[in-house]
Amino acid sequence: MTQLVIIAIYLCIVLSLGLFASRMFRGTSSDYMLASHSIGPFLLLMSLFGTTMTAFALVGSTGEAFARGIGVYGMLASSSGIIHSLCFFVLGVKLWQFGRKYHYRTQIQFFRDRLESNSIGLVLFPVLVALVIPYLLIGVMASGTVINKVTAGRIDKGQVVDETVTFARGTFPDFLELGESQSGEQTFAAGSAGGVPKQLASLAICGVVLTYVFFGGMRGTAWANALQTCIFMVLGILTFYVLANKLGGQDGFLANLQALGESIPENKATRVDISKLKFTTYLFVPLSVGMFPHLFQHWLTAKSANSFKVPVVLHPVFIMIVWVPCVLLGAWAAGSLVDVPGPVAANPNAVLPFMVNQLRIPALAGLLTAGILAAIMSSLDSQFLCLGTMFTEDMLVHYGGRQRFTDKQVIWSARLFIVAIVSLTYFFSLFEPRQVFTLGVWSFSGFSSLFPLVLAAVYWRGLTKAGAYACVLTAIGTWFYLFRASGYAADETYGVQLPFAPSGYEVMPVTFMILASTVALVVVSLVTRKPSEETLKKFFA
Amino acid sequence: MKQAVWITIVALLILHQDFWWWDDGYLVFGFMPIGLFYQACISLAAAITWYLATIYSWPAELEGTEGGPQQ
């Protein structure tokens, strides 16, 4: 129960901060969506980092390191340190400049002007929303799993130990308490196991995020992000320290680290189980940040171009601070000093919360869970707000006519769309869960396949309207084709066999998506009508 | 200097492909697998490189530009 009280207190603090920020709300749609372009370097660093690090970074990285070893750091963390900052530098600053000059609030407004296409939004909007939804699902699903595992009772020989539960059997209806065990039976141990049922935990997180985004808008989101980023970094390091001392069984921190290091199985301490070609082609995945609509919106909140310098420099260091401990924890969990039971091992998302729960120090477990939730919520909020902004600006106001709506109506339509998206995401999260890491990689791959579009829009005068359409349609077409081929992310190690290469030479699906969308963009742009001189002057003067 | 910064970034992307540590399970400081240690160093090198980029490759026309939509 102590864990649950701490989690509840933490959620109240976040909620209060978001609501406090809403008292500074200036009442305009620009303030609601972009915090009146007032975000300085520190808040920008925290909100960009908090937004890009989600359940994927904490729960996903630990689970993936448990399943595949330390190679997961090179696959996504160190590559992101280079590529994310590259995107902030070469795209973020430029797009901030255009946004400031031409009053953009969304990506689509920029593309509409740059491509001289009134209809590009009709193609891009559904594509971007469809790609954000798996990303949202990662957070909603993981938050439910984490709260459930940390508040659940201990399982001994397949049975829940009654004295250790937070909620006794029968507190909730069966459909919330029972789950399918490995033998196919519906049991309490495979369900909520005496913790907060996943469905209710996810619902609570959706409710908290929705409330502070609804009232606080971008300012509330940025403040809550900064707080949550500080919390998950500090508590992440604390988790690592406490777990190392608990699991190592030696005297002294270094001795514990060494004992745990030696316990890592050979295949997890190296990358023998990871394909080199896949490792190399993982480099394309972090390009997704160039096309994340919620990051675009955060870029536009910057007070000045100089605000970008701190995030560009410190982003790789922050990634390292968060990922190295998580990857080590996952690798230790695969070793002989940590006994991960079968049901947990079958669901790598549950490895980190399981280890936290093993501490048997309820107050600390509650605090550490708050840290994990902080990481999750700091991404969910930006994504929800961004979708509300896009719907209002790119659909309702653009096609309905700006003069038909008052500023207040614009704010309210954004809020109502946010409520609809939160509800839809929550609904999807109730279905069969996928591994957080795998789902994340598919979502990011889709955004990466649109990267050639934003790069060309900023740096290539030759990009045409038809080229942009060809790029978007090819990207989403190849994404869907390959996603389907992977069994809708059921095959977690899915790769695409290289043509004319010996069997086993597989690359990440994102490689073909980017290749196809780039070829479509370039070829079609070369043979179709160029944008007007006026437009080119506007963006390339 | 501007070019040197961009060359360093490309070099980092190449150095990131550390196939030479692929099956080496040596523990640095007795606890950190070398493949992980090396990649953590890549993260630090990236931060230093990006610091140099903000000094030597920052678009001069943007120095001192303030936020808020231009009217």
Image (spheres, coloured by chain):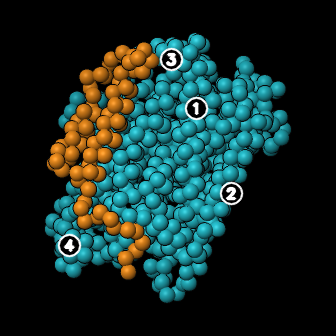
Q: Which disc, if any, is residue A541?
A: 4
Mark 1 vs mark 2, CA separation in Å:
25 Å
- Residue under label 1, please give it: A238
Q: Which mark is residue A254?
A: 3
Q: Which chain is orange?
A: B
> Label 3 to label 2, Cα distance in Å?
40 Å
Q: Measured along the vertical axis of the image, is residue A356 above or below residue A406?
A: above
On the image, the x and y values in percent for residue B24 come to 33, 17
Instruction: Tell me the quarter of the picture where residue A208 sits.
Output: bottom right
- Residue A486 in picture, x, y percent from top left: 42, 41
Q: Which chain is cyan?
A: A
Tag 2 secondary structure: helix
Which amino acid, mark 2?
A: Ser
Residue farthest along the front direction in this orientation? B64
Give the x, y percent position of residue A315. Answer: 40, 45
Left or right, residue A508 beside residue A348 = left
Which residue position holds label 2? A16
| Residue A390 sits above or below residue A376 on the image | below
In the rendered image, residues at marks 4 and 1 fall on the same chain = yes
Q: Say what amino acid the circle numbered 1 marks.
A: Leu
Front-lying residue, A503 or A36 = A36
Of the residues under marks 3 and 2, which one precedes in the sequence? Answer: 2
Q: At label 4, which amino acid type do we have?
A: Ala
Instruction: Calculate the distance from the C-alpha at mark 4 to the C-alpha at mark 2.
Output: 46 Å
Mark 4 or 1, nearer chain start: 1
Judged from the image, the secondary structure of the residue bearing numbered disc 4 is loop
Write down the chain letter for disc 3: A
Chain under label 4?
Answer: A
Spatial CA span between label 4 and label 1? 51 Å
Question: Could you give the CA–CA distance between mark 3 and mark 4, rounded to whole angstroms?
Answer: 57 Å
Pointer 1 or 2: first along the chain: 2
